[in-house]
Amino acid sequence: MATIKDVAKRAGVSISTASYALNNQPNVHEDTRARILKAAEELDYYPNANARNLKTKKTGNVGVFIYGFGGPIFSDILEGIRNQLQKHGFNIIVTSGKSSSVLLKERQVDAAIVFDNNILDEVLIQYAKTSPLIVLDRTLESDNIYHSMIDNEGLTYQFIEKMIEKGYKKFSYLSGPKDAYNNQERLVGFKRALEDHKLKMNRFLEGDFTIHGGHEIGLNLNIETGHEFIFCANDESAIGLIQGLNQRGIKVPEQLAVSGFDGIYLSEYIQPKLSTIEIDHYGWGKLIAKFIIAKLQKTSADNLEHPEAKIILRESC
Amino acid sequence: MATIKDVAKRAGVSISTASYALNNQPNVHEDTRARILKAAEELDYYPNANARNLKTKKTGNVGVFIYGFGGPIFSDILEGIRNQLQKHGFNIIVTSGKSSSVLLKERQVDAAIVFDNNILDEVLIQYAKTSPLIVLDRTLESDNIYHSMIDNEGLTYQFIEKMIEKGYKKFSYLSGPKDAYNNQERLVGFKRALEDHKLKMNRFLEGDFTIHGGHEIGLNLNIETGHEFIFCANDESAIGLIQGLNQRGIKVPEQLAVSGFDGIYLSEYIQPKLSTIEIDHYGWGKLIAKFIIAKLQKTSADNLEHPEAKIILRESC
DNA sequence: CTGAAAGCGCTAACAC
DNA sequence: GTGTTAGCGCTTTCAG
């Protein structure tokens, strides 16, 4: 690999002049600059990131740490983040699992966006001592740590209230994993809405946020008398549930009403089309990235906003 | 941030001794080692990756470069790759878009796995001059570049042949984007199978690999007389197609047979269940990662295999 | 078993 | 406009 030294030698200048030219600094004679650039070109020179980063204490990378590569949610958020980041010359690096803590500890990224419960608080706090950090799935108060979260509780509350107005009376909850932050908050909103309207939860169905989990339940659920409304903690569960019900010939929403949460792409393509609480994930990603960029460039101190959401009533309830 | 110098000072040893201790080298007295480790602990010391990488010319990172974060395929492959990589102490870094070329050029990763048509051949060739590279979506012959690909053509051929044996005679093709490698190869296999059995393609439907694209077609397709078989270039198209057809009350497979390609999770959860060519994406990812690890550790020179696949006949044809 | 010192490739004062 | 040089934080010879 050619180094800046090679370029300098070939162009017949000193290393520093080469560096200046290569970094588009002024104060380099045009002819010299041209010679240097040409030499770099000929040698297939590309700066060594480690050396540069070591010196400048910056990497130009922003890390996104997620708990898994799967799922329709992350892909939208990631695309939103990427879009903004790359517009401003930052690289997006996404990782998951053990690698996350390593990259964080080694500071391989200038800023971090975290959506992974498995990363320890202390790792985050330590990281935030020097670099901005955004957490999306926990409340962790510390300097340099910022939050942006879905208003799970409020949105669920609103939604259930709307359904009550619509005449539903018998509400059940199909949950996500017990330890999932989103699930917990949604459940709180759900319960609170019912309480405030003097209703109580009909039954609690334990799911896992997956289509598979919902499907199993749909296949085996005993259908009660009285028009039941199953609020699913996310769209995937709801989709699986509906598929299972469909297979048994149970009509949604006629015999059983169902709704989801997230507003994933698929929710429009099932039958009946899923009613849900739609989160603007792509926009959320952009929002987050914009904030990070501002922080890194110290341009401003905007507030980090929360993602936009709206209730979408389609056919399933 | 504490550096190794701080640790050494606090432990009352030289920098080199500190380095040895921190890197679990032998030849350090246990007491000294303990003192150093304690100092490191107290100072929240963590090695600076850039300095280390600059010196060792290694990063411990393997990059995966994909054309987008969406889609059910990548998530499985990525999980497979991650699983293996992390088992062996490597980090997975995934990125997309402009960042890909940057990370590649700057050699921020010790090895690369590429599944993104947008990255230029020359960038890859340049990268491969020093580091192993696996391409999954193009044929690019060069030193240090390895391939692992789905046998798109062969599998499609086999599948169609099987369907011909089953009695189908009228085959149409629902494509992916024209420029997608996978799509092209599948089409070749499709046509060849028909030719070899003296049949010709009934019609060519232009899709885009998405549920949405398939759905539009399903909604608008004019149903011909004679039992038509629509081979979809991927599962998502097929799923969309079936949903569109369902909405119009057209029965699959009774009135129209459909099949997909990929074997995504969802394909089991639609009605009718989708018949498809299932690729073991997770296993593929593991395979790829294993090969990379061997290369990086120079353990062996295994051949890089191709992903496993099998034909899954469910209900849609 | 421990320390001194060179050097990885680059940036950025500082001098001229 | 250009060159000299220190030094980022670390690993690793080489001496002792």
Image: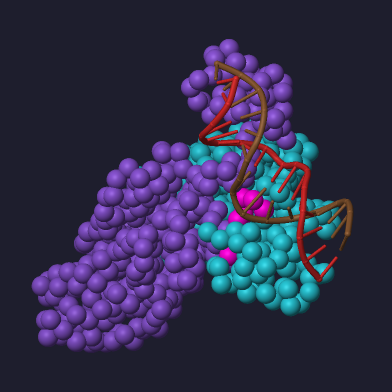
Chain colours: A purple, B cyan, C red, D brown
Q: Is residue B194 visible?
A: no
Q: Is residue D13 above or below residue A315?
A: above
**From the viewer's perspective, is A139 left or right of B120?**
left
**From the viewer's perspective, is B133 left or right of A296?**
right
- Residue positioned 37% across, 59% down in the render: A144
- Residue positioned 51% across, 25% down in the render: A24
Q: Is residue A237 above or below residue A38?
A: below
Residue B129 shown in magenta: no
Q: Is residue A38 visible?
A: yes
Q: Quadrant of residue A28?
A: top right
Magenta-drawn segment: B45-52
How many labels, in total? Answer: 0
Which is more toward the observer, B266 or B138?
B138
Question: Residue A61, how many percent across, how many down?
Answer: 50, 47
Q: Quadrant of the N terminus of chain A?
A: top right
**From the viewer's perspective, is A219 left or right of A51?**
left
Which is more toward the observer, B228 or A171?
A171
Q: Quadrant of residue A270?
A: bottom left
**From the viewer's perspective, is A283 left or right of B94?**
left
Which is more toward the observer, A79 or B136?
A79
Question: Residue B277, how many percent across, how many down?
Answer: 60, 57
- Residue positioned 67% across, 53% down in the render: B52
Which is more toward the observer, A136 or A112?
A112
Q: Quadrant of residue A220?
A: bottom left
Q: Is residue A165 above or below residue B103?
A: below
Q: Is residue A118 above or below residue A86?
A: below
Q: Quadrant of the C terminus of chain A?
A: bottom left
Question: Residue A296, how many percent across, how many down?
Answer: 40, 47
Question: Residue B312, how many percent across, how many down?
Answer: 60, 63
- Residue positioned 32% across, 57% down in the render: A268
